[in-house]
Amino acid sequence: MFASWEPWQRWTTIVAVSIAGILVLGAAFDGIASAGRVHPGVTVGGVAVGGKTPSDATKLLATELPKKASTPVVVTHKPKNWTVKPEQVGLSFDYPSLAASAMAVGRSGGLGRSLSQRATAWVSGVRVDVAAATDPAKLKSTIDAIAQGVDVAPRDAVVEIDGTSVSVKPSAEGVALKRDATADKLLAAFTSSQRTFAAPVEVSAVKITDEAAAAAKTVVERMISDPVTITYDKKTWQFSPGEIAGMIAFESVQASATSGATGDASAAAGDSSAMGSPTGAWVLQPLISASEASKTIAPKLGAGVGRPAQDATFKTANGAVTIIPSRTGVGPDIDSLALSLTRTLKDATGAARTVELRTRLAAPKRTTEAARAMGIKERISTFTTTYGSGNRARVSNIHTLGDALNGELIAPGATFSFNGAIGERTAAKGYQEAAAIVNGKLVPQLGGGICQVGTTVFNTVFLSGFPVIERRNHSFYISHYPKGRDATVSWGGPDLKFKNDSEKWLLVSVSYTNSSITVSLYGTDPGYKVSSTTGPFTNERPAPVEQTPDPTLVKGVKVVVESGQTGKTCVVKRTVSKNGAVVRTDSFRSVYKPVAQVVRVGTKVVAPKAPAVTPTPKP
C-alpha cells in the first residue's frame, strides 16, 4: 500500500503519526505528572492552584479568595456611586467545590475535550469561574439601596387645565436598575481585578405619550367650548366652560382593535381620542368625574331635586325608647349624569349641549330593620346631677355638651371615650368661658362645666355595671357630687372610658334643664346587679394657709377669703353580679389634694390719738 504512495504522501503521513505520537506521549506524561493534582495552568478567581492536591487547593483558596474579595466593589451610575463591602452581601465561598471544579479541568468531557483543556492550560491557562454564595436578605437590601438611587419613574404626558386654558406637560422616560444583572456583576467583581462597574440599567417607557396627551387636549378644548344646560322637569341649570373644566378628569386606557378603547366608561363615552391608536397603545381619555360633578352641580340643584334619605333614629322618654322609622330618599343620579355629560360635551356644540338629569332612590344608612336589630329597647341605667342656674356660661356649656353626647351609639364590644365622642371644646362649637378646675384652682376656661357632664356619665355607667376602663377624680373634693364618684375630663388630658361588653348596641340619652342634667344608657339589659360601698375619708391632710398682706386692713385684722379644704382619700367599691355570680369587682380610689385657705392680713398702721388737754380753771 505504502509503495504506491507518492513521496509527499508518505512524508505527510509520517509527520502526522509522529505528531500524534508526541501528543499521546505528552498527554501520558502530563497525566502521570499531574496525577492526583490540579492540572498546571489552572486558576480559580485569579488564584493559581495548578499542581496542588485538592486538599492543598482548598486550603490555598480559603486563604487567598477572602483576601481578594476584601477590597470593596464600586457600582457607578452617572455622578453617583455605591461602595459595597463583601459583608454587605454576606459573601462566602464553597472552597472544596471550587477545588473540585479546578481538579475537573482536563479530566472531563471525553478524550478530545480533556486533551484540549490540558493543552489550553499549558499554553494560556484555564480560569475557573468562582460561584460565590450570598445572604439573600443582605444582597437584596444592597441592591435595593442602589436601585433607590438609580431608578427614576417614567413620567406620563398629562393634560393640564387652568381655568379654560389647556396645555400638555410632556412625558419623560424613566430609568430602572437591572437587578439580576447588577447582582451577577457585583458577585463577579469581588474575585476580579476590575472592582468598578457601571450599574446596568434599562429604559422605562411611558404609558401616555406626548401624542396621546395632545389628542386628549383637543377633546378637552371641545368639551369646554360652550356652556352646558342640565334639565329636570321644568327646571334648568346652566354651567359655564370654566365650571365644566373643573369637573374634567382623565382615564388611561389601552386602545383595542374593536371598540377603539377598553373599559366600560371609556367605550360608553365614545372617546374619539382613542380612534386611530394602535391596538394596545395607551390613550388618555377626558371625562366628567362623578365626584367632581357632585361638588359642582349638587349645590346648584339644592332642594329642587327629590328629597334626602332619612335614617332610622331613636327617641327616649320616661325610660321608654321608640324607633323613628327610616325613609328612602330620591336624589340626582350623578353617575348617570356624568356619563351623559361626557358624551354630550364631546359630540355636541352650541344649543345642542343639553343633558336631562335622572334621579334614583337613595337608601338610608340605617334602615328601620337595622335599628331594630341593634337591640336598643329598654333603659339600663340613669343618673341626674344638679347645678346652680345663675352661671349662664357654665349652664350653656353643659347644654352644648349634652347635645353633643345625646344619641351617641356604642357598638357591642366597643369602648366609649368621652373625649372621642365630644371632641375638642372650641368657641366655634359654641363653648364659652366658665370656671373650671385647673391644677387645683378654679380658673376661667373654655368649656367650663364639662366635668358636671363627665361625672353624670360616670355615675350612669357605675350603676349599669359595665366595665370602667379609665376614670380620674377631681384634684379637690366637690361636696355636691356623690362622695368618691366624681370624674374629671379635659381635652388632651384625663378621659372617661367604659366598655360595652354586652351583645347589643348602647344608646346614650341626655336631657337637661337649667339646673340639672340626666344621662341614661339604653340597650338590652345585660342583667347586671350592682352593689357598692363608700368608705370613710382617710389620710386627711390639713389645708395650707396662704396669707396675703392687705394695706387696706388695720394691722392685726385678718379676713378669710377662701376657707380652704383638707386633703383626703376615699375608696368606693363596686360589685357587679349576674345570676347570683360575681362578674367583677372594682375599686375606685379618689385622692383629693388640700385646698389652701387664703387669708388677707392687715398691714395698715394707725397713729395713736394725742391725749386730750384739760384747760386750767380760772380763779
Image: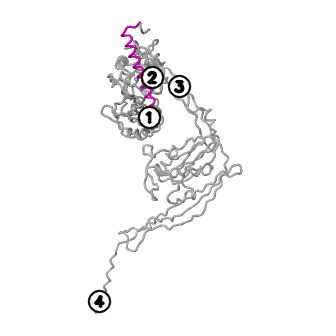
Tag count: 4
Q: Earlier in the sequence, mark 2 or mark 1?
A: 2
Q: CA distance from mark 1 to mark 3?
A: 71 Å
Task: State the residue lying farthest toward the bottom.
Answer: 619
Quadrant (top left, top right, bottom left, bottom right) of the C terminus: bottom left
Crowdedness near tag 2: few (<14), some (14–19) or many (≥20) residues, C-alpha within 10 Å? some
Q: Which segment is the magenta one?
A: 4-32
Q: CA distance from mark 3 to mark 4?
A: 113 Å
| Labels 4 and 2 touching (C-beta < 8 A) | no
> Mark 2 sits on what residue?
113
> Mark 3 sits on what residue?
330
> Mark 1 sits on what residue?
132
| Labels 2 and 3 touching (C-beta < 8 A) | no
Q: Quadrant of residue 28?
A: top left
**How far from the left and from the top, in percent, is residue 572?**
60, 58
Nearest to viewer (mark 3 / mark 4): 3
Crowdedness near tag 3: few (<14), some (14–19) or many (≥20) residues, C-alpha within 10 Å? some
Q: Earlier in the sequence, mark 2 or mark 3?
A: 2
**How far from the left and from the top, in percent, is residue 384?**
58, 51
Please tell me the numbered disc located at residue 616: 4
Which one is in front, 229 or 176? 176
Asked if 4 appears above or below 593 in the picture, the reply is above
**How far from the left and from the top, in percent, is residue 571?**
58, 60
Residue type at mark 2: give it: Arg
Q: Earlier in the sequence, mark 4 or mark 1?
A: 1
Residue type at mark 1: give it: Ala
Task: State the residue lying farthest toward the left.
Answer: 618
**Residue 585 in magenta?**
no
